[in-house]
Amino acid sequence: MGVEPGCLIAFKILYRGKGVYILSIISTLLLYYSVFIKHPKILDTLIIISALNVATAILSDSDSHNTVFYALRISGAKPSTVMAYVITASLTTSFIGLIPVVAKAELIKSLIALSINFTAATLILYPTYLRIKKRLTSAVT
Amino acid sequence: MYEISVLLRDVWKSYKFGSELTTVLRNVNAAFKKGEMIGIHGPSGSGKTTLLRIIAGLERPDRGDVIISGYNLNLLDEVGLSMIRNSIVSYIPQDYGLVDTLTVFENIEIPLLISGVDKVSRVKSVSEVIQYMGLKGKENLTPSHLSGGERQRVAIARALVTTPSVLLADEPTANLDWSNAIKVMELFRNVRKDFNTTIVIVTHDPRVLEFVDRSLNMVEGTLKEITPKT
């Protein structure tokens, strides 16, 4: 049993894109605040910034995601392959964006942040796929 | 074995634009034989691309049957249609649908990856198609480093790598100058001869019809034969 093709393609797109690199740099820089700033609201602020960072990372590679969804649809990718792509891209960016939150070592808040990050990424990626799917059905020529 | 690769029976398709219903395909009936090259000609907005997408299983007709190599697409669910697109019907859109972040090799490999072919077999199949398409030496380039004609050949290669029974090409020469267009049409002829693939080409350029076995005209959503050739 090989690797699910959706996962493989997602990893290629992410490491050749710019989103995860920008996300990694900003997440690492935010570690400073996480480690050295002792404020009661800092973790909640980092959770929000983390989600925004993940969304930005996904959006910065939106051209690549668009063309991949188009190619997958034309080439006969099953819905499960597309979902594997969406989940892989969302989870990978979510974990990277989680770096400054995890540094605070609060498990519940980390899990909440992971859920928020994942939701933010999926809410961008899945509708993108649906738009591409619709683009291949409703044009009239 | 089926002599008829594509059978369209009483196919209708309409779209709603606002409150207005526009019928794009009206009672389309056609049969394309195995190994035949068909040209469908018509102006923009005549429904050619819609017809192609229905044959590819990318959208469903409102009425009528679409039977591809014996499979009635109306009886298939999303997963079934995906499998048809992955193994029996290949569709080449007008904009080629290539992924700029992936290399030529990786673009061509996509359908085989999707169908779960192992790496060794994938490398062999993709390398053979690259050789056949005259793309040797370009495997590690991305589409942005290729000419228009080369990108078209990558799109054809990706469509061919699964050795489909039916190849659908939407305006394959629209973005090319005429000398490159001739090369692409000759390539389709070779594919038809070497693989016995049924090829359906949609075009608004009447010169392209010189290369096909049979020409059909899309007039107000219906197909009419224009120049039957023997």
Image (spheres, coloured by chain):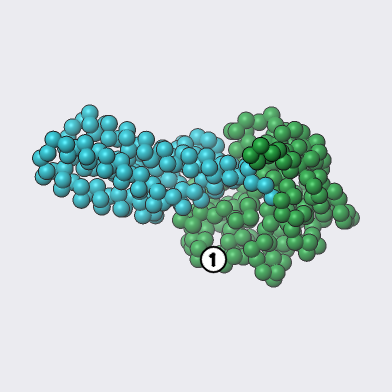
Instruction: Tell me the quarter of the image containing the C terminus of chain B.
Output: bottom right
Where is residue A74? Give x, y as percent: 59, 46
Query: Which of the 4 quarters of the picture holds residue A18?
Result: bottom left
Where is residue B177? Give x, y as percent: 67, 69
Identify which residue, B177 or A39, lies in the foreground: A39
Tell me if I can see residue A114 in this picture. Answer: yes
| Residue A60 in the image: above or below residue B76 | below
- Residue marked by disc 1: B146
- Compared across the picture, whether A130 is left or right of B49 comes to left
Identify which residue, A124 or B89, lies in the foreground: A124
Kind of residue at disc 1? Leu
Identify which residue, B118 or A132, lies in the foreground: A132
> Residue at position x 70%, y 69% from top?
B178
> Residue at position x 62%, y 65% from top?
B149
Q: Which chain is green?
A: B
Tell me if I can see residue B116 in this picture. Answer: no
Query: Which of the 4 quarters of the picture holds residue B215?
Result: bottom right
Q: Residue furthest front?
A: B19
Q: How many marks?
A: 1
Label 1 packing within 10 angstroms: few (<14), some (14-19), many (20+): some
Q: Residue furthest bottom?
A: B179
> Residue at position x 22%, y 31% from top?
A109
Where is residue B32? Give x, y as percent: 80, 45
| Residue B214 in the image: above or below residue A34 | below
Label 1 chain ID: B
> Residue at position x 74%, y 58% from top?
B204
Where is residue B94? Give x, y as percent: 63, 55
Dot 1 falls on a residue whose secondary structure is loop
- Compared across the picture, whether A2 is left or right of A76 comes to left
Instruction: Tell me the quarter of the image containing the N terminus of chain B.
Output: top right
The colour applied to the residues of chain A in this rendering is: cyan
